[in-house]
Amino acid sequence: MSSRLASLTVFVASGAVLVLEILAGRLLAPYIGVTLQTFTGIIGVVLAGIASGTFIGGRLADRRDPRTMLPVALAVGGILAVATVSLIRLFGPGLDGGVASIVFLAGVSFLLPSAVLSAVSPMVVKTCLDSVEHTGQVVGRLSAMGTAGSLVAVFVTGFVFVAAFPTTPVIIGLGICLVVLGGVLWFVLGRPASPDAAIGCVLALVAAGGLAVSAGTPCDVESTYFCAVVQVDPDRPSGRVLVLDDLRNSYVDLDDPTHLEFSYAQIMGDVIESIAPGTGAIDAAHIGGGGFTMPRYVDATRPGSSNVVFELDPTIVDLAEDELGLQLTELLVARTGDARVNLRSLPDASQDLVIGDAFGGEAVPWHLTTVEFVGQIRTALRPGGVYALNLIDFGDRGFARAEAATLRAVFEHVAVIAPVARLVGGAGGNFVLVASDDPLPVEAIQARNAARGDDDTVLADPSRLDAFVGDAKVLTDERAPVDQLITPER
């Protein structure tokens, strides 16, 4: 086996494992979400595959002629890579997103292809060793090529493939490349395996690809960050629900932008009407766009208001325009990219209201939770301006309590709004937190909530807030273990 072909083989096989590892997050997200636990499970399973595959591949290479196994290993690795799509579609529905579910789904899908492809490297090393005198040189060169393949795969997949193509075609393309490379090796190495095996690999690839395509996709639109689905509300023909991965993110009424369906959005409406009674225009910034429910509400109820929306994903903005009736104007502007970076573009003391709606379920961008970020928001607010944010938590409310402590470290007045059962820790769901340097209109918010027939409590008394926060620590850029603080619903 020539050194160039050996290097190419290790480069491709090692890179393929990293392509699968990166795309695993996108494939699993619609079923178990995207959290630190998700990526921990994926990385752990892939590493287990690499370790076991390298070990087994080395043992097999010592016992059998590796030239007979290399073409088959590459082809089978490609077939198993393509099979991950249908396996995830088969086992994913119904899983709850717990640690066991994450490890199971990642394991059943990615352990075998990672192991088979990782077995290639020791087999190639064995074919290239003609004397022990050059062992270090051969192993070092092939190890370097394997690492180079992994690096290229990381950058190309993360920066190009995920942004430009749906996940399934990329996986299928990867499988085809691996099978083709296996076929090349089969010819170059003198056709060491049976022709029947080669034909079987091709047929298996076609079958796996067919199953992957027929399995479909749970997404209407697959972006760099999300699997997005728009659902029609059967009880309200003009109602649309935007689902991102496994979370019902937004509700939009195409005919009535003042209709707020979700309870947390209604509370946000209570806050807006209480801090700025009437129909006077305000300046509002929104962290997180989704379906653009609240920007359109402000635009409709307060003509002339300016709304700047910081949305991470440009594809979601396009989806909102195409399917959710969003019309961007000079007064309703979307700025795509990370909100923490884009927030710096706001002039100091320029906003009456900042709404935070980027904390979806268990997938929380931790850098938008910290005291440093809250300090940026305070700088952007005018005197008396208000920061209102929505978050979801369960159980002992670790995240909700820590975020309340963080707001209190920056603002003079803080309120937490939720049903009593959530405040005391007996139930989970949405919490709306409101903060300002001026006294908050607690009674007005409570009155509007009661007028709608809801039983939410506005918790604003300092002593009761002390009891709610308890021993929760302020979140900082140095320490914000948000994924661990959120107690998931099980």
Image: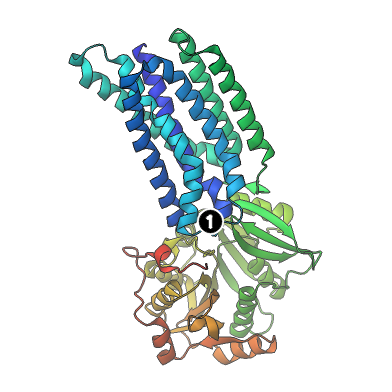
Left or right of 176 on screen, residue 150: left
Instruction: Point out residue 221 in the picture as x, y percentages from the top left corner.
Output: 65, 47
Residue 162 falls in image quadrant: top right
- Name the element at disc 1: loop
Foreground pick, 113 / 448: 113
Number of residues whose C-alpha sits closer than 10 Å to that of mark 1, classed few (under 14), some (14–19) or many (20 or more): many
Q: Residue tagged by mark 1?
A: 33
Image quadrant in which the N terminus is located: top left
Residue at image coords 56%, 62%: 288
Residue 24 % position (x, y):
50, 44
| Residue plotted at (66% across, 66% down) | 293
Observer-nearest of 28 and 207 = 207
Farthest residue toward the front? 63
Q: With 153 as the anchor, is 177 left or right in this view?
A: right
Residue shown at 32% from the left, 32% from the top: 55
Q: Residue 262 at what x, y percent from top left? A: 66, 72
Q: Amino acid at mark 1?
A: Gly
Q: Is residue 73 left or right of residue 443?
A: left
